[in-house]
Amino acid sequence: MSQTVACKQPMRTLAIGDIHGCFKALQTVVAAAEISADDHLVTLGDYVDRGPEVPQVLAWLRDHYQSGRLTPLLGNHELMLQACRDDASLRAEWLEFGGRATLEAYSDDSKGLSLEDIPPEDWLFLEEHCVPFHETETHIFVHAGLHPDLPLRKQYPQILFWDRSSVHPPHYSGKTMVCGHTPQEGGYPVNHGHAIYIDTGVYQKGGWLTCLEVDTGEYWQGDQQGNLRHWQLDPDQ
């Protein structure tokens, strides 16, 4: 007697742009994309600052990291937060750059904001488990950008975490770069073929959080009000 065996769908690789403490938007795209334990999720950094729900975002990331299906990248805002912990003189600038929202999310006392309100498990996640880049057979994931002529382990931190180029040159590897960091005009991701930009300014008025399925070009966007957009990227855009 023959048996019918259900074929398990292949694991997807999904990238999520800069979350910036916007947990409601994150929940929206995760539900819409039906992200499961069978998917590999790459988050592009900037989990902290600007938005109101940093603790919830980091708790969600920590839980999914434990499953082994999440690769969390570092963003420039995580680097600024870590630098403030080591050098108090940097704190004032960081607070004005979005850090105040992070400390307020951890504290009930807006006049007594302190880095010590951030729990050890969140520091451990940011300092020990977030990585500067991720590479697959076809794609390279970074926060801000890539030097086109350098291998990943020789990339300049200034480019990996801070670069604001509107269009990066193709990387010599021939792989497609997926990055965040620079909010795209109109709240839509931009696909240049060799480079895809998916920071769509979720913390801004009218902004969205983008989740991209890198092999098919399908993406989902959610905002802090729970609104959803679902699109297919044009590979020839």
Image (tube, rainbow, N blue to C red):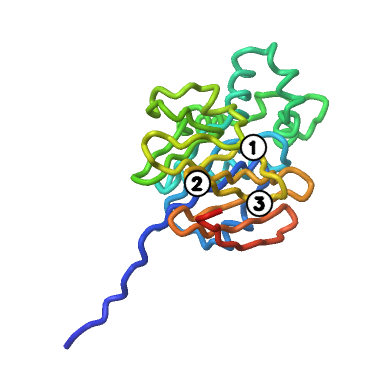
**Image coords of residue 165 (percent x, y):** 60, 32
Decide: few, some or many residues near mark 2? Use Cα within 10 Å; few <14, some 14-19, many ≥20: few
Taking the spot 67% from the left edge, 61% from the top edge, the residue there is: 228
Gap between marks 2 and 3, in whole Å?
A: 29 Å
**Alpha carbon of mark 1 to alpha carbon of mark 2: how far?**
27 Å
Q: Which circle's residue, 1 or 3, is located before the other in the chain? A: 1
Residue beneath the point at 74% across and 34% down: 101
> Is 228 positioned to the left or the right of 8 in the image?
right
Q: Secondary structure at mark 3?
A: loop
What amino acid is found at the position of numbered circle 2 in the picture? Asp
Mark 2 or 3, nearer chain start: 2
The image position of residue 12, as x and y in percent, is 42, 57
Label 1–label 2 contact, CB within 8 A: no
Q: Residue at x 35, y 62 (%)?
A: 10
- Viewer-side label of 2, 3: 3
Q: Looking at the picture, how far across and down is residue 93, in whole percent?
A: 73, 19
